[in-house]
Image (spheres, rainbow, N blue to C red):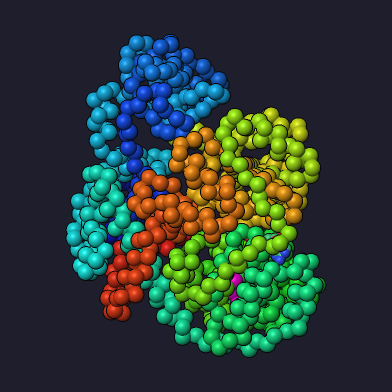
Amino acid sequence: MVLEENITAIKGIGNKTAALLNKLGIYTKGDILRYFPRNYDKYSKIMPINTIKTGMMAVIFAMPVTVPILKQMGRKSILTCEVSDGSGTIELNWFNMPFMKAKLKKGVHMIFRGRVVKKGRFLQLVQPEILTEPEYYRKSEVLQPIYRLTKGVTSNLLRKSITEVLSEVTSKIEYLPKEIKQENSLISLKEALHEIHFPKSYTTLVDARRRLVFDEFFLFALAIDRLKGEREKFRNSTIIERKSTVVEFISNLPFSLTNAQLQVWKEIENDILGGFRMNRLIQGDVGSGKTILSILACLLMAENGYQSSVMVPTEVLARQHFESFFTMLEPLGIRVVLLTGSVKGRERKDILEKIEKHDADIIIGTHALIQEKVAYDNLALVITDEQHRFGVKQREKLANKGNEPHILVMSATPIPRTLAVILYGDLDISIVNELPADRLPIKNCVVDEDYRFTAYKFILDEVKKGNQAYIICPMVEKSEENDELADVISYTEELTELIGNRARIRYLHGKMKNDEKNEIMEDFASGRTDILISTTVVEVGVNVPNATVMMIENADRFGLASLHQLRGRIGRGSAQSYCIFMSGNTSKEAMERLKILNTSNDGFKIAEEDMKMRGSGDVFGIRQSGEMAFNLGDVIGDADILKLTSETVKCMSDKIKNECYYRGSNFYKNGFVYGEDIMTL
Ligand code: ADP
Ligand code: MG
């Protein structure tokens, strides 16, 4: 089979359908093969109504006890009906599905399957599927793959096309040597591809996932290994000496550096003054004060006549960094410029010219900076703020850039050291393991719907004191598929109706244009907005010390690492901050996870606990580690596989390493391993 062959070679896919599939990033047969289900539907056992709990996908065998009511509201409709199974009754609710009414017959038992939510004091099943008994038994036997879809692309189309491509896959696709498969108890790649799409059972799915996660981590480990080999060669080509300006700058700061900051600064300085090029990772929890360390490093460079660049993942963050750098360094005569995608035309040309002529000492911008051709006069330091993405590709690109600059990578993901040394195996690691002393620990609480109005009142009280609040929703807009999840747009409408006369409310999400996002963020940062309702876009590094409350809706739907990152947006000033985790899901597992956050503000401790709590192979689990460059693998949840791959690479000969790397990357091409720039939400 030819993996590079265009998808139009698949039966039933013409140019029109191909264009739709392109939107999902599917261009070739190989792409569709690697388009793994994002989840599987499994039909659980039928349960009595009086045992179901909020948050679960429940299956009940019940009969309507009321006449179904269909309410029309403009273009929207709501269908409701009460059903009973002898153990209890529950209301069923369909949004914009009026045709379901005909299926509901009073007194006739049917199987209903839907998500349980709490409405006021009662439970409800939302958008339940209606099944006959034979339908249910047939479906409950197999795991149904669920794919991410787009308009015009159905699950059926994907299933059919994937089946066809799978039938062409032969065992030649394998690239791992037999010994490695045996030692690590891995199934073949061919089998894994079959089972990930169409699992025969839960056990085979777990094996398939394990094999594919192994591949991801393995190729990643090989890439790191190569980087490491390359980097060791570079000698330090800059001539730097210590400057008294830096010492004065530190003593003139409005605060004194923490011991951890001082220690890490010493490590950075030693690198820069040493014999080899710096390749250092600074890991520090949110709010530990990493920015000032990057300012110091750039200052030292500038004082020695070298340029530095600072790259961050988003425009909003680039702007904020620019302001911090500018305010602190401009008085010393250091020239800082901002270069992002929205700087255009004449202005862009001027900035590029300044960089080339060395009329700019420090260049702050988004990662686009590395993609395009920026000519520097003498770039000697590149700082990249990774937040919580592990992008080897970016590191690779940097390593190959020009004059072998020093490299400093900042990461706000507190991951256990045992994993950090693997994921950042090509870098030396420094840890800022202390928060500034003036911080009050964030007060946390985990609550359910009953607390909602108390929470709003609490937020309004904070607003009255002149503070600000974030409210985080998992979705951008209403979605039928995830009806029970809060979305930014309707949430804002509802909250504005409720308290809009007492607080200035705005919203933010990742689908907005950059200019709009910047304007909204600046409005919030300058205090002209009191409550910002947002998706996790705010997670990425924004600094508004005046924000003292964060309320997270559907908190059980986020991974622990994401929740911790989100919470890091508050507690950045000297005032007391509060985080409210709102969760309708009161299952034991959800509560246990949230309890970890409730009782600790220490990211490293949370990551350790998280790792202990989760076994691997948790196919249906929530990705704990937020957005990462891995497709299937979860650094925390699959920590044991990650360690295994790293051990495996250590024991391999260079020849086999090379072979595996080339053949493996040939199959997993187009960044499946490293992920492209995954800036969703
Ligand atoms: P992060 O590590 O999350 O990037 P920042 O560098 O944004 O954290 O720092 C958070 C806030 O703490 C900033 O407002 C910064 O000025 C302040 N800060 C940094 N170091 C100290 C310190 N030693 N004492 C007090 N405040 C500090
Ligand atoms: Mg930061």
State the image quarter where residue 142 is shown.
Answer: top left
Q: Is residue 494 magenta?
A: no
Q: Is residue 68 left or right of residue 76?
A: left
Q: How many marks?
A: 0
What segment carries the magenta color? 379-383
Q: From this viewpoint, is residue 480 visible?
A: no
**Camera-nearest residue between 405 and 466:** 466
Task: Give the x, y percent position of residue 534.
Answer: 61, 44
**Ligand 2 falls in which quarter?**
bottom right
From the image, which quarter does the N terminus lie in? bottom left
State the image quarter where residue 60 is shown.
Answer: top left
Question: Which residue is located at x 36 percent, y 23 percent?
Answer: 48
Question: Looking at the magenta stretch, what is its main secondary structure?
Answer: strand
Question: Which residue is located at x 71 percent, y 57 percent?
Answer: 439
Q: Is residue 93 left or right of residue 257?
A: left
Task: Give the x, y percent position of residue 213.
Answer: 34, 58
Question: Which residue is located at x 60 percent, y 65 percent?
Answer: 433
Task: Give the x, y percent position of residue 670.
Answer: 39, 62
> As displayed, is residue 181 above or below residue 474?
below
Q: From this viewpoint, is residue 231 visible?
A: yes
> As displayed, is residue 268 above or below residue 282?
below
Question: Which residue is located at x 47 percent, y 14 percent?
Answer: 69
